[in-house]
Image (cartoon, rainbow, N blue to C red):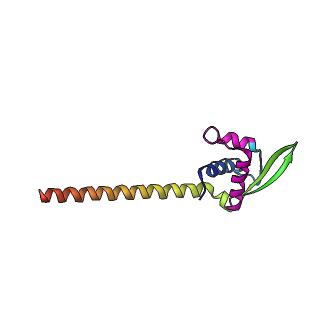
Amino acid sequence: MLNRVESKIMDYMFERCDGKKTVLLTPKEILQSLLPKYELTAKQLDGHIKNLAIDGYVEVFNSDNKGQLVYVAKLKTRGEAWHRERAEASAKRWRSIGWKLMLTAMGLVISLTFWLIMR
């Protein structure tokens, strides 16, 4: 399970890689996509990207372009299914909330019925 920062980074990478085999990403543009909610350093960003690579979402290579660090990113199979995975997690969360609301309503009806009988 990814944390919020990694999810935002993955959203950005998925958006940029959509329909392409590989894409060049600079740390600066990734950090800009996270602002203003998440302020990271380049070292923290590098750690999050390595975690995404370890988890099997992306394949990332560091490259040098005119003296600047550039990530060469390619989505793996799990990364290509990113939006489907997020949609399934969201649907599962809403089903869980619906189930809890239904149990709460049933408890209310049962307690109200019991209260009326005792009265």
Residue 67, image x, y percentages: 87, 43
**Quadrant location, the N terminus:** bottom right
Q: Residue furthest top?
A: 36
Residue 53, image x, y percentages: 71, 59
Instruction: Residue at 36% x, 55% y: name it.
Output: 101
Residue 48, image x, y percentages: 69, 53
**What's the magenta bit mostly, secondary-structure-wise?**
helix
> Going by the image, does 102 lie left or right of 19?
left
Q: Nearer the viewer, residue 94 or 61?
A: 61
Q: Is residue 33 magenta?
A: yes
Q: Nearer the viewer, residue 12 or 50?
A: 50
* Snapshot quadrant of residue 52: bottom right
Q: Is residue 41 magenta?
A: yes
Instruction: Residue at 73% x, 51% y: name it.
Output: 46
Q: Residue furthest left?
A: 119
Instruction: Residue at 58% x, 58% y: name it.
Output: 85
Q: Nearer the viewer, residue 106 or 38?
A: 38
**Quadrant location, the C terminus:** bottom left
> Going by the image, does 3 lie left or right of 30?
left
Q: Residue furthest right?
A: 66
Q: Nearer the viewer, residue 57 or 35?
A: 35
- Please provide the residue range marked out in magenta: 28-56
Q: Is residue 25 above or below residue 109?
A: above
Instruction: Residue at 80% x, 55% y: name it.
Output: 61
The image shows a total of numbered marks equal to: 0
Residue 115, image x, y percentages: 17, 57
> Going by the image, does 12 lie left or right of 21?
left
